[in-house]
Amino acid sequence: MDPKPRTLASDAEHRYGRGSLVDENLEFMARLSLIEQALPMLRMSEVREIAEALLDLLVVEARASAGVIWSRSEPTGTLELSAARGDVRVTEERESWPGEPESLGEALHAGRTIVEPSGSETPERIFLPCCDGDRLLAIARLSGCELEAHDVRAVQACEKLAELAGIALAAACERRALRRSSLRDRLTNLPSRAFLDELAKTELQKARRFGRRICLLCIEIEGIELHPAQVANVVACVARTVRTTDVVAVESESRYWVLLTDSDPIGGTVLKRRIASRLRETLALCDPGPEPLVGLATFPHDGETLPALCREAIARVHATRTSIVRELGIDAGTSLASIGERLRERALPMPGEIVSEAADLLVGELGCRPRDRGLLFFAPGKESGAFLRPLVALGEAEVATDVFLATEGETLPACSVVSALGLPPHVSADTSWIVRFGEAPPYALVAWPPEDDGMRPAFHSSDQLLVEHMTFRLRAEVGFGMRASACAL
């Protein structure tokens, strides 16, 4: 009988055994499957999208109960939290890669995977680097992995996915750098409005995740067309005033934007007034002098998307043009007593109960809006009881608004959020004042002593700019501090 002819398959089976061929074939099929799963990542253009897609694949391959990815952020170059899956408390995770311990960071920067075995209190964890050559683009951490000690295939599969993700991330970073280089205004060398749109997407996502507030300032220069030298002065003035973490962008020679990260309306208003003041000084040499107008919008109270915040900020700029502040000639240096005298000319006769009713309403709203940061100032005049009663009812309620009560020796209610103040200079003790400023809708009321018919001359308004001026004059003339939760003026 002729011997059985030898084939490539039979020769391989004779050398390695049938089991080895099956294992090799299964491993080849698995690698092909991983490449097929990773293909969508190579088509993605956003770093965050790639991070989320990679984490979904890694959690399945490692049979992990939780996963987190930190990816490279431009232009800072830090590794920032990009995606989280499973049993993860995002608010407890570091926003930036902690880099601890140093030995772990050195290994990951060298492109090595780290597997930490489970301990008595900690589950097994896998740290995977995503690299482009010598550059570390992302770090994935998988927790609670259900792997046997000898199960290296799952780790190898995760490494292959991380390697493919490194290619996708490198391409996305290059595209992002090209976009940003083209999103710069040639005249001012500032980022353009399109760049701001791109950046704001990431900042708003982080604000939603960590419960932070963001402010958006719109700056408009009206009056004359600025020359290039004047534009350069405006840009330099704004750049010197903002924080290093804030972003200044240009839409046109007369409109600029400032994105304030991690800032509430009170902190944003402080910067807004500082920018407006310095711009007036810078533009004072122009003839005629243009007027800088600044509008402020806050996430999430004024909008939850960038278009909504932009619309609100522009609306605040337009409201500044028609504000009663401009009609009455009120500016940052106008004293509170002078503001009261000018508002007296606009007062209307109102029922004597208007002060007590307004106090009841505003204190009642504190319970409905406990998280709103801001301040509420009361000067009772001759009606201290009208203010004390609702404040006593407030009790020990936990609210983020600070309440200040101008008293003349009266006993304050037992309430932790109420502080005593004296009246500003030259302000009559017979006049009742209410000023509310912050995240709640602005409101101001001034009521003078009753006339013979029992009606009280009173003026009240929700004019944002007027309430802002009154608030800062109170701060300048009386002086008060605010809790850290409400951001000190």
Image: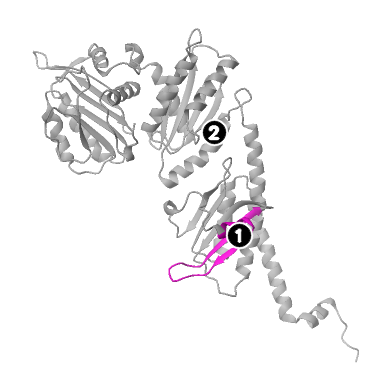
Cα distance between the residues tagged 1 and 2: 36 Å
The residue segment tinted magenta is 103-131
Instruction: Locate residue 69: give its quadrant.
Output: bottom right
Q: Which amino acid does label 2 sit on?
A: Leu
Q: Residue furthest bottom?
A: 1
Q: Is mark 1 on a helix, strand or loop?
A: helix
Residue closest to the eye, 203 or 110: 110
Q: Is mark 2 on a helix, strand or loop?
A: helix
Q: Which residue is drawn at 27% across and 16% down?
A: 339
Q: Mark 2 points at which residue?
A: 196
Residue closest to the eye, 99 or 252: 99
Instruction: Locate residue 17: give its quadrant.
Output: bottom right
Q: Residue at x 63, y 49 (%)?
A: 169
Q: State the image coordinates of residue 272 (x, y, percent, origin top left).
A: 42, 26
The crowding category of the residue bearing disc 1, from other C-alpha atoms within 10 Å (few below 14, some 14 to 19, many at least 20), is some
State the mark number for residue 107. Answer: 1
Q: Which amino acid does label 1 sit on?
A: Ala
Q: Which residue is drawn at 9% across and 17% down?
A: 454
User: Which of the image's four quarters has the N terminus?
Assistant: bottom right
User: Which of the image's four quarters has the C terminus?
Assistant: top left
Q: Judge whether residue 315 can be spotted in this image.
A: no
Q: In this view, does 146 lie above or below 227?
A: below
Asked whether 107 falls inside the magenta stretch, the response is: yes
Compare marks 1 and 2 and give the one earlier in the sequence: 1
State the mark number for residue 127. Answer: none
